[in-house]
Image (tube, rainbow, N blue to C red):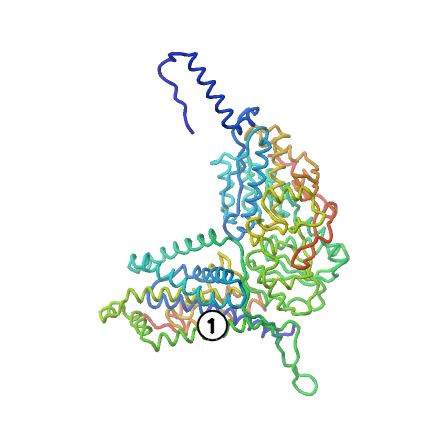
Amino acid sequence: MDFGPYLMLASLEGAVTAAVLALMAAGLSLVFGVMRVVNVAHGEFYMLGAVLAWVVASMAGGGAAGFVLALAVAPLVVGAVAAAADVTVLKHLDYDPERTIVATIGLLYILQQLTLMGYGPEARPVEPPFNARIALPWVEWGQGGPQLYWPWGLSITSYKLFVIGAAAAVLAGLWALMTHTRIGLMMRATQLDGEMAQAFGIPVERVYALVFGLGAALAALAGVLIVPIQQAHYLMGGDALLLSFIVVIIGGLGSLAGTVIAAILIGMSDGIISVFFSPTLAKIIATLLVAFVLVFRPEGLMGKRAR
Amino acid sequence: MTETKTPSAGPADPSRRSAIATLAGAAAATSLPLWARYTHAQTAAPIRIGFQMHATGIGSAYGRWYDRTTQAAARLINEAGGINGRPVEIITEDDGTDPKRGAEVVEKFATQHNCDVGYGTLFSHVVMGSAPRAGELQLPYFVVSEGHHVASGKLNRWTVQPGITDVKSQVMAMAPFVAETLGKKVTMIFPDYAFGHDHRDFFTEAMAANGGEVIAKLAIPPTETSFTKYFPKIPRETEVIYHVMVGPAVLTFVKEMGEFFGPSRPAIFGFIDSLEAVDLASPGLEFLEGTYFWEGMARYAQPDQTEFDRHYRAAIGIDQNGASTRDPKDVSTYAHMFGCWETLYVIKAGMEAAGYAGPADRQKLIEAVEAMTEWPLSNEHPQGAKLFNGKTHQVFGPQYISKLEGGRLNVVQTTPIEAGFYPDEVDYTTRSF
């Protein structure tokens, strides 16, 4: 394949990765921003979303209806599980940074092993609601000016385009929620100063439970979106968690815009570098980027300096 | 362990006491008929087989079916009177599909569980991590891994693979079919670690020997989850794609390959390893219709199904489509797990030939297995007749080539055992214990 079409293919693949990553990392960043909790179990909420998508879709008999139902149900269930975990576990640790890390590590193993026991070790697919293969054209300068042609293998599926669109829509909705609604205002107030917010009558505990649930629901939504492309598997949370942490550190903890920028950066570079050089190099560069950010701009690209 | 206490006072009425003892013995003999089978053995203590199971980690789909096969075979062996008149007990330990943990499990078998042998490892990196420890502990270690590492001479005299043919032999048997039927110019797609490298090296050699050529080799990192970006590296003149992927992302791999090629695809030959424990009716797999697979043993019952295959399926609880009889969506790892079954029967035959009585006879057991040469197609060896090479500790059996038609795999060719022969690379019998 020529360089141009190849680059386009790699970018499109990178964009799908970036979209899912942005959703997941936004959840992680939200939880850290508001609650100052490093949620190590975040990857398992993503996995749980994918697994529940399979459960719901197969109970509904598959097809487009099953997927749509899963899209609605799985994030709600996962969000409820996470909110319950917040009320029963994290609250009793007083959101102490070190102890919550250990607690979420425990949560990670509990969720993972329960899934293995109940759902099993197989990777199971969910049927996409639509999945037309779209061959893409490329411009070539032949005799008599530019002309379109269809290179071999240059294509994307309609579902992958939908994933990119859906992620963008959800992120826009999240941004609107944070900036234009009363509940968003409460979250931002809690983020700025929890004690002061409480003094002004904001039910901080409930906001915490809501935020933890919302963060997990975003991860679960990413899981539901990815499951028709990949498959639901009980170990899928591990790599996703690692990438989300990279994204969140580069973008700046607690900053939605930074998270999106970093997700695009990491997703695209992963797609492109691993195609033209090697996948290992892509990982090396991502990790190196984290190191540079931590050294030269510890608050991240868009993060605010701690006061 | 319960200890019998001796009464401090002497027996008041010896004849009555012995009468009661006799009665109790008779009661035990009638109420527990299982005991009776083992009474001719010197000891009725069970033979303990340590089963190293991939219960968690990336190998867990295989682990589950290796376990079911193992339990079924052990049950049948016990029902038929055990080994040397002693019952068989399977001691299962999870190794997490992890080499380091694997070595610890082997150590546990030898020192903690007092196992007679270790058995059952599949993933090659776990075998590589565990076998040296088994050698140090002088524990006979029967692997069911299909890796070439046993026959390559990298391991030790205590490690044997008597249940499943190794990768080198498998690919040598496949190359003539690929070159003659599918095409001469092959692009290989394989995971970038030992198992994939075995395929790469041996298949490239074997294709050259059959007048074909491997024109591109795509090594894919084992943790990769999206594949479309690799496919443009497939040269346009490719006539055959040879794929062997493992791990949870294989369905994605197949799906994305279908989306990449669209309507115009080359011939495709794959190892069923890519789709073990996967329902071939899964969405996205329609693309593979009409492509060919290597199978270690035919997942779907064939028209010429042997009575041995029928017996084997019934014992484990597998239906005609290779899925669990209880849940048709629970698909087995049919092309590999027969190795567990056959290995257990080889352990049984070896222990009987060696007159195995306890851990002191471990060396005799290895020597007895090394002396074996062939096993006929039978209930003990339902996959096919086997030839065993005692020098390389490796078994050789027939291989199957199947075509995916109408969502099921139909065997189109069975390769003879000789097609997978290669010169010995090691003689373990000359090594010390």
Q: Nearer the viewer, residue B149 or B82?
A: B82
Where B349 sits versus B178, above or below?
A: above
Residue B227, compared with residue A165, is above or below; it is above
Q: Quadrant of the C terminus of chain A?
A: bottom left
Residue B332's x, y, as percent?
59, 50
Q: Residue A79 appears in which quarter of the rendering?
A: bottom left
Instruction: Give the left or right position of residue A156, taking residue A214 as reference.
Output: right
Tell me the kind of residue under disc 1. Ala
* Residue B281 in which image quadrant: bottom right
Residue A59 x %, y %: 50, 60
Return the residue at label 1: A167
Label 1 element class:
helix
The residue under the point 54% across, 26% down is B36
Can you say whether A243 is above or below B358 in the image?
Answer: below
Q: Relative to the observer, which residue lies in front, B233 or A136?
A: A136
| The one of A174 and B174 positioned closer to us in this rendering | A174
Q: Is residue B18 left or right of residue A126?
A: left
Residue at position x 47%, y 72% in the image? A167
State which chain disc 1 sits on: A
Of all residues, the one furthest to the bottom in this rendering is: A144
Position of B40 with respect to A265 (left or right) is right
x%, y% of residue A157? 58, 71
Mark 1 packing: few (<14 Cα in 10 Å), some, or many (20+)?
Answer: many
Image quadrant where one finds the N terminus of chain A: bottom right
Q: Is residue B31 above or below residue B397?
A: above
Residue drawn at (41%, 56%) of the image: A108
Q: Quadrant of residue A290?
A: bottom left
Residue extending farthest to the left is: A199
Q: Is residue A280 visible?
A: no
